């Protein structure tokens, strides 16, 4: 406990280890053929007349890290809440841990760890008490709650704040506490709704590391995110949601291969110039996206595109050639950037 | 008919409801002084109105027909009214706040706890607090030598019954509330009930027509229940009061149990 250091910077004590990015389906191994942990068919959520989730199909295998990507209002949280059995499904089929949320809500929830999009900590209690009472809601004996609470405070590097009330904690600390809380019942399946939104880079890396360790222990992770690096780091497989529907599914690599080119050339022009360049990019690349602040040219060889653009007399202020990322997939599928 | 109504009530909540009491105990560990607030209110009324005003009024007719000191007349009524007020505050304002603004309930719902467990636990907690205030108030009555009969001990379960009836109906009403303005309606009902339910003046000081209406109000039922117990003159009326309040509470619970899932699980 003494070596724990939660400086404002959120500095991690351990050197953050380089970690391989998630591999495609092949590495999923043992879980791949087992019965899915979550099974959804034509899953639908309506709020009155409005359809927030419109007949989506997906399966999550044991031990997998599965992501939902999508712009604001796509229906990610609504889907997560149905899986978490806190929101009744309007239509379709859903089974979680081989049980039916309609009937077995409490039994399913007993095995879930839930990190909601917005922190729901008990502001009338201290940091440690938040963990203790949460363990009690799961029916754990008091001594066990105490033991796990101390362990988890250590795990998220909050041991020295145990006696403080929750309210004055920083956003990142609250987020870490919420994650610790979700682990008190040693869940088999974690539902993480934008776990790292609002965190500084160091706190995010700490959380990624923690989630990665959980995954190594065989915990299944389902998460939503707006960060493509997070999706690439953590998810074995993900779906892109847009306007209540799933528009694509696959591993991060598969999605990039399927929906984007190998490379992207990004051109930025001096203010006012881009608008005068209508038609001048035609035929330069496989696909062209004109964003307000830059032009993206998709091709397997970016340098090639730059050269032909120059020979056409185009003179961008800055040029960047990079590999395609999920961000590009997202732009292609939803017509929007990931972070708005 | 009764059997049909009773089924959902017995299915209402589980032992997990006790965890809500545990949570509240943890909260009050941080500020246990707040617990006393509900104790002083009826005490101040007793001192000012019961003894102060009582000196001018002298004796009034008690439940058995014989004259009793005004303070003894008012004390059980104050106990009933404070049981009502405590239950209403807890089950309306506080409950609405926790339902809609505080995320506490939302976080508890991601555990095996159900909406029914939460409500039952909150109800039980409100009753425990009410019970503590009642014990404190009874101690004061003993101190002032106001004990006439051992039956006064039964005012404790009596006050709990009043608390249960009002809290259950309060929660049921809250489940229909949309905005804070709707709560003004509750005040509109509670305040006149507090003033006119035979709390401060005997029933026979009201005109005939008003008397019947007053007798139908739940607070009158509670006031008269505790008054007969405190003075030690029980009769068939006492049983009617108990039956009235029990039914009221059970109906409230039945309504809550049907509406709560809809409210909390969206
Ligand atoms: N309780 C509710 N009542 C009515 N409409 C709702 C409710 N909850 C969500 N919605 C609507 O459903 C749609 C999907 O919302 P949801 O929260 O699932 O989106 P999201 O993908 O999580 O978005 P974000 O990235 O902003 O968190 C939105 O249009 C939202 O307004
Ligand atoms: Mg969301």
Image (tube, coloured by chain):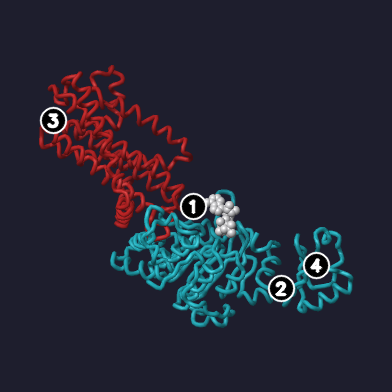
Chain colours: A cyan, B red
Pointer 3 chain? B
What is the chain identity of the residue bearing mark 2?
Answer: A
Residue A95 at least partly seen? no
- Are the residues under badges 1 and 4 in a single subunit? no
When the figure is inspected, residue A145 is found, relative to residue B17, above or below; the finding is: below
Question: x and y percent of residue B246 in the render?
Answer: 26, 40
Task: Check disc 4: other Cα within 10 Å, few if <14, some if 14-19, many if 20+.
Answer: few
Circle 2 residue: A260
Q: Label 1 crowding class (10 Å Cα cut-off): few <14, some 14-19, many 20+?
A: some
Q: State the separation of the CA atoms marked 1 and 4.
A: 51 Å
Q: Earlier in the sequence, mark 1 or mark 3?
A: 3
Residue carrying label 1: B266
Residue at disc 1, CB closer than 8 Å to ligand 1:
yes
Callout 3: SS: loop
Q: Determine the secondary structure under disc 4.
A: loop
* Residue that appears at 56% across and 75% down: A236
Q: Is residue A336 above or below residue B40?
A: below
The residue to which callout 3 is attached is: B233
Furthest residue to the left? B149
Q: Which residue is mark 4?
A: A317
Which residue is nearer to you in this view: B106 or A276? Answer: A276
Q: Which residue of the protein is positioned furthest toward the right in this rendering?
A: A312
Q: Quadrant of residue B5?
A: top left
**Disc 3 vs disc 4: Cβ atoms closer than 8 Å?**
no
- Between the C-alphas of marks 1 and 2, the distance is 38 Å
């Amino acid at each position: 406990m003494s070596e724990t250091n939660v400086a404002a910077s959120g500095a991690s004590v351990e050197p953050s280890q380089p970690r391989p990015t998630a591999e495609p389906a092949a590495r999923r191994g043992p879980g791949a053929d087992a019965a899915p942990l979550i099974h959804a068919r034509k899953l639908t959520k309506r709020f009155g007349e409005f359809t927030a989730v419109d007949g989506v199909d997906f399966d999550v295998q044991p031990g997998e890290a599965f992501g939902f990507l999508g712009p604001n209002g796509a229906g990610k949280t609504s889907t997560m809440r149905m899986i978490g059995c806190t929101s009744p499904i309007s239509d379709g089929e859903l089974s979680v841990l081989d049980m039916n949320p309609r009937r077995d809500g409490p039994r399913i929830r007993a095995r879930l760890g839930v990190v909601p999009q917005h922190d729901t900590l008990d502001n009338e209690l201290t940091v440690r008490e938040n963990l203790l009472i949460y363990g009690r809601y799961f029916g754990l004996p008091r001594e066990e709650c105490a033991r796990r609470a101390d362990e988890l405070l250590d795990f998220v590097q909050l041991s020295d704040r145990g006696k403080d009330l929750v309210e004055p904690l920083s956003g990142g600390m609250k987020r870490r506490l919420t994650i610790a809380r979700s682990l008190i019942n040693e869940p088999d399946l974690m539902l993480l709704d934008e776990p790292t939104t609002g965190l500084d880079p160091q706190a995010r890396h700490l959380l990624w590391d923690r989630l990665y360790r959980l995954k190594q222990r065989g915990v299944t992770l389902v998460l939503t995110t707006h960060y493509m690096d997070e999706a690439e780091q953590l998810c074995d497989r993900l779906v892109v949601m847009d306007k209540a529907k799933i528009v694509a599914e696959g591993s991060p690599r598969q999605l990039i291969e399927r929906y984007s080119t190998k490379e992207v050339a990004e051109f930025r022009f001096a203010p006012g110039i881009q608008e005068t360049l209508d038609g001048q990019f035609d035929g330069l690349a496989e696909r062209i996206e004109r964003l307000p602040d830059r032009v993206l040219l998709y091709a397997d060889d970016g340098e090639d595109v730059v050269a032909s653009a120059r020979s056409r007399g185009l003179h961008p202020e800055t040029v960047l050639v990079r590999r395609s990322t999920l961000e590009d997939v997202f732009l292609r599928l939803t017509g929007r950037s990931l972070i708005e | 008919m009764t059997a049909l109504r009773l089924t959902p009530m017995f299915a209402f909540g589980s032992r997990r409801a006790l965890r809500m009491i545990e949570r509240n105990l943890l909260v009050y560990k941080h500020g246990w002084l707040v617990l006393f607030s509900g104790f002083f209110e009826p005490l101040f009324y007793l001192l000012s109105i019961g003894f102060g005003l009582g000196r001018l009024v002298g004796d009034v007719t008690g439940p058995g027909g014989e004259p009793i000191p005004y303070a003894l007349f008012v004390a059980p009524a104050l106990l009933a009214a404070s049981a009502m007020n405590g239950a209403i505050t807890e089950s309306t304002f506080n409950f609405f706040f926790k339902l809609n603004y505080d995320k506490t309930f939302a976080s508890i719902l991601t555990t095996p706890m159900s909406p029914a467990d939460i409500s039952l636990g909150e109800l039980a907690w409100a009753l425990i607090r009410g019970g503590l205030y009642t014990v404190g108030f009874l101690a004061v009555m003993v101190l002032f030598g106001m004990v006439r009969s051992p039956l006064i001990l039964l005012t404790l379960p009596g006050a709990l019954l009043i608390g249960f009836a009002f809290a259950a109906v309060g929660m049921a009403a809250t489940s229909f509330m949309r905005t804070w303005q709707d709560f003004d309606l509750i005040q509109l009902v509670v305040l006149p009930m507090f003033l006119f339910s035979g709390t401060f003046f005997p029933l026979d000081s009201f005109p005939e027509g008003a008397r019947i209406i007053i007798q139908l109000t739940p607070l009158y039922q509670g006031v008269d229940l505790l008054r007969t117990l405190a003075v030690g003159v029980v009769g068939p009326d006492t049983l009617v009061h108990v039956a009235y309040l029990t039914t009221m509470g059970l109906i409230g619970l039945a309504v809550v149990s049907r509406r709560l899932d809809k409210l909390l699980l969206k």
